[in-house]
Amino acid sequence: MLHPSYAELIQSLNSDVVEGEAPVVNSRYSVVLAAAKRARQIINGSKPLCESVCNKPLSVAVQEIYEGKVKIVGDEEEEA
């Protein structure tokens, strides 16, 4: 079983959102894309931002997202 769960990840990512603003992440798809992109960065040589029980890049990426060490930005913000 995946820990943290998708629900916990989404809740963690949206914890800083002020009421009335759009959530940072509102679907599992967004979480999966962010984790895959970060895992690819780790595979390509980026240093992990947190300690993880498992050394697999995807597990490390999910842990980083859960701990808030990685910021998820939209396409508009990324291009700016």
Image (cartoon, rainbow, N blue to C red):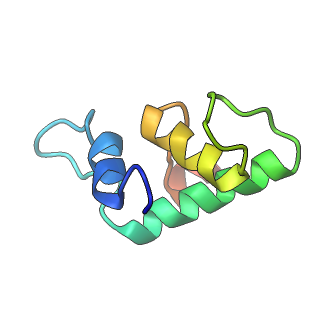
Q: What is the tally of numbered marks visible in this picture? A: 0
Q: Residue at x 51, y 65 (%)?
A: 32
The answer to whether 57 appears left or right of 32 in the picture is: right
Which of the two residues, 26 or 39, is positioned nearer the viewer here? 39
The answer to whether 64 appears left or right of 25 in the picture is: right
The answer to whether 9 appears left or right of 35 in the picture is: left
Which of the two residues, 5 or 20, is positioned nearer the viewer here? 5
Q: Residue at x 11, y 45 (%)?
A: 20
The answer to whether 71 appears left or right of 58 in the picture is: left
Which of the two residues, 19 or 80, is positioned nearer the viewer here? 19
Residue 36: image x %, image y %?
64, 61
Would you place residue 5 above or below residue 13 in this image? below
Residue 28: image x %, image y %?
38, 68
Q: Residue furthest left?
A: 19
Which of the two residues, 40 or 59, is positioned nearer the viewer here? 59
Would you place residue 58 above or below residue 13 in this image? below
Which quadrant of the figure has residue 64?
top right
Residue 4: image x %, image y %?
39, 49
Would you place residue 65 above or below residue 10 in this image? above
Residue 19: image x %, image y %?
11, 40
* Quadrant in which the N terminus appears: bottom left
Q: Residue furthest bottom?
A: 29
* Res. 49 visible in picture: yes
Q: Residue at x 50, y 48 (%)?
A: 73
